[in-house]
Image (cartoon, grey):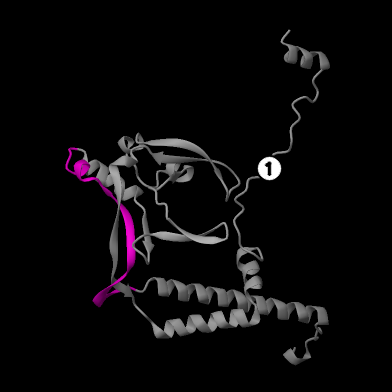
Amino acid sequence: MDMHDWPYIKKSARRKKRLVKKDFDKQLIRLDKQLDILWATKYKLPMVPLEIPYQSGWKRLFVLRGDILRSTKGEFYQNLLKKINTVQYHHDRAFKKRKRKRGKYVYSEKQQLLRVIDEYDWLRNTLKLTDREKILFSPKEVWSVRKKAMITEYHCMETWRFVLVVKPHIIYEKKQHDELLERQIKQIKNRIDRENLQPRMSKLVGGSRHKYWKWREEQKKYKNELKNKPLYSLQEEYTGY
C-alpha cells in the first residue's frame, strides 16, 4: 500500500494549540539548560593575576591576640580562628553605617562577631571541629526572624582571645573575561526579560512560578488542655486538694 493512500487523520484545533504550547515549553527548557551551561562555563574561568595590584577599600577581620599567639596554645586557637573567622569589607576605614534616627541621619559602627554555628552545621560538623574545639562553644536559643521560630545556635565562649583589626583590601587577581561568553549570556537574558519568559521557565524547571524557600514550619493546631477533663479534677488541680 502506498504511503499516500494511508488515511489522513485531521488534527483538531485544540490538539494543534496543545502541540504548539508543548513545543514552546520544550524551547524554554532548552533555553534554560543553555543558560545554565553558560553560567557554569563562566564560573569555571580561571583567575588572572594583575600586573599592578590596587587597593579596593578596607577589610576588617579577627586576629589572635599577641600574648595568646606566643603561648603554648597559640597554634590551637589559631586553627580555631580559621574556622570561625568573619571578614567585612567597607569603603571607609571607620566601618560606619548610615542610619536614620528621629528624622536625622547618624553614623554608627557596624557590628562584627565571630561566626555563629547553626544547628544544621553543628550536627553535621561541616566546619570539622575537633572534640577539644567543641568544648569552647555553648548552645543558645534565639528567635529567628527568617524562620519565625526558635532555633539553636552555638557561640564561642572565649571571644576575648581575638581582636578586630582593619587592613587594606588589596586586589591581586581578577576573573578572566570572555567577550563571546558574556555576549551569549546577555542575549539570552535580554530575550527572557523582553518576552517575560522567567515565570514560565521557573514553573517548567522548578515546579513553581515563584522560587522560594518555605522556612516556616507548619503551625500546630491549638490544643485545649482543659478539653475532656471533668470539672472536679480541674478544681483539685487549682485548689491543690
In the displayed structure image, the side of residue 182 where residue 192 appears, left or right: right
At x 69%, y 39%, the residue is: 220
Q: Does residue 2 appear in the picture of this structure?
A: no
Q: Quadrant of the C terminus?
A: top right
In the displayed structure image, the side of residue 126 where residue 50 appears, left or right: left
Q: Which residues are magenta?
A: 46-72
At x 61%, y 64%, the residue is: 206
User: In front here: 6 or 228?
Assistant: 228
Q: Is residue 59 magenta?
A: yes
User: In front here: 103 or 94?
Assistant: 103
Question: Three-letter amino acid code at disc 1?
Answer: Gln
At x 82%, y 17%, the residue is: 230
Q: Is residue 97 above or below residue 234?
A: below
What secondary structure characterizes most of the magenta part?
strand
Give the percent coordinates (x, y) of residue 87: 36, 56
Residue linked to disc 1: 219
Q: Is residue 111 magenta?
A: no
Give the percent coordinates (x, y) of residue 178: 38, 82
In the displayed structure image, the side of residue 170 where residue 139 appears, left or right: right
At x 62%, y 68%, the residue is: 202
